Amino acid sequence: MKRYPLPLPASRALLKLGQDLALLRRRRKYSQASLAERSGIGLNTLKRLEKGEPSGSLAHLARILCVLGEVQRLEQLLDTGADELGLLLMNEELPKRIRKKRQPKAAM
């Protein structure tokens, strides 16, 4: 199976996510070991996530955010109501006018 490199913008986003996760943890005065234990993940897994390595899973991130009381941020990650391009494409496909369907004439 061919492996494709992670695009640079995605790599930068993961790095920022990891840095933000580490900052959030430190502000709440959790050690890496205690957060990993409370989240039910390994310490090395948490360290890799905080470094922004792409090997982490969404389940690990969800567990951590749940412990930190921030799981709603994961729910809002891809808010479809704010999908400007998707809404624009949908609007382009709307009919120009809507006509009432004709009723078939009843036979007498």
Image (cartoon, rainbow, N blue to C red):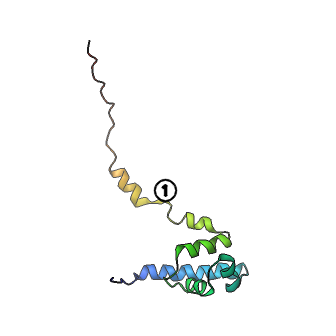
Q: Nearer the viewer, residue 94 or 102?
A: 102
Mark 1 crowdedness (10 Å alpha carbons): few <14, some 14-19, many ≥20: few
Residue lying at the far top in this picture: please name it: 108
Quarter of image, res 22: bottom right
Task: Check disc 1 and report its element: helix, strand or loop.
Answer: helix
Residue that label 1 marks: 81
Q: Nearer the viewer, residue 106 or 94?
A: 106
For image coordinates 32% across by 50% down, the residue present is 93
For image coordinates 65% across by 78% down, the residue present is 24
Residue 37 position in % (x across, y down): 68, 80
Quarter of image, res 103: top left
For image coordinates 59% across by 71% down, the residue present is 62
Looking at the rendered image, the quarter that the C terminus falls into is: top left
Residue lying at the far right in this picture: please name it: 29
Total numbered circles: 1
Q: Nearer the viewer, residue 40 or 73?
A: 40
Q: What amino acid type is highlighted by mark number 1?
A: Gly
Residue 23 position in % (x across, y down): 64, 81
On the picture, is 59 further left or further right than 88?
A: right
Looking at the rendered image, the quarter that the N terminus falls into is: bottom left
Residue 88 position in % (x across, y down): 38, 55
On the picture, is 103 further left or further right than 72?
A: left
On the picture, is 101 further left or further right than 48?
A: left
43 is higher (above) or lower (below) than 95: below
For image coordinates 41% across by 82% down, the residue present is 6
Residue 42 position in % (x across, y down): 62, 84
